[in-house]
Image (spheres, grey):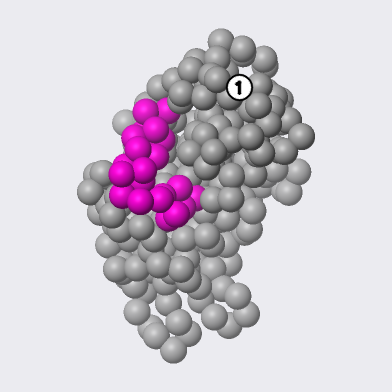
Amino acid sequence: MSAPLIDVSDIRHRYGDRTVLSLPGWTLEKGQHSLLLGPSGSGKSTLLNILTGLITPSEGRVMVDGVCISTLPPARRDQARGQLFGIVFQNIRLISALTVRQNLRLARSLAKRSADEKLLEDLIQGLGIAHRADAKPRALSQGEAQRAAIARAAAQNAPILIADEPTSALDRGNAERAIDLLMTVADRTGATLIVATHDDRIRSRFSHVLDLGDTDMTTDPSDDRSSGDIS
């Protein structure tokens, strides 16, 4: 049996003497859709930052696609982040001076991917923003900007697609549509999808849920509980 795409083992992270995240284990297979659920302060951002190599855990190991992210030197870690992860940021982060199409091209370039205009056109068409492909971000509606951000993340053709709070500002109907888009794009590109959110409305859409709010994976120094369940 092949190794999981993501394998997190015995992670613990501290700020000073305060433990903000304690996670015995978490694995994801290639192409799996996973929900990372929990309220603000539950450790979602810390776990994402550890997973993508932005911070090094105080203890434990993170393996991504056979690479031990947690022990890579900084320069190699930055390179691995660009190649392994496509990220849909909560605040969109499209480059305002570039058109939608140019944002997608830049994402591929930064990820050290060769030009692939067919992939970009497929993403633009598939996400319904062909009429906005040559527009700059300020001309986009909120929904169009969100779809452009999803397209930009998918354009990297990375094995892992992460969406940070993609539904928190949306009503239920639009939240469902956003999840539909993310799942469709992940399936189309073969990516593993991780959606991080406090929005419990979308829980039923995922068969694999890591709930940081319902478990004891995050701890306080005065609290000696340390176990948790992963569904």
Question: Residue at 35% of width from left, 51% of height from top?
Answer: 171
Is disc 1 placed on a helix, strand or loop? loop
- The x and y percentages for residue 33 are 34, 39
Which residue occupies the foreground of this view, 115 or 151?
Answer: 151
Which span of residues is magenta-colored? 164-185
Which residue occupies the foreground of this view, 91 or 119?
Answer: 91
Residue 25, quarter of picture = bottom left
Looking at the picture, does residue 19 appear above or below residue 209? below
Report whether 201 appears left or right of 36: left
Magenta stretch: includes residue 135? no
**Is residue 25 at least partly visible in the picture?**
no
Question: Residue at 58% of width from left, 24% of height from top?
Answer: 132
The crowd level at tag 1 (other Cα within 10 Å; few <14, some 14-19, many 20+) is: many
- The x and y percentages for residue 18 are 54, 80
Looking at the picture, does residue 103 appear above or below residue 68? above
- The x and y percentages for residue 193 are 41, 38
Question: Residue at 57% of width from left, 62% of height from top?
Answer: 57
Q: Quadrant of the N terminus?
A: top left
Q: Quadrant of the C terminus?
A: bottom left
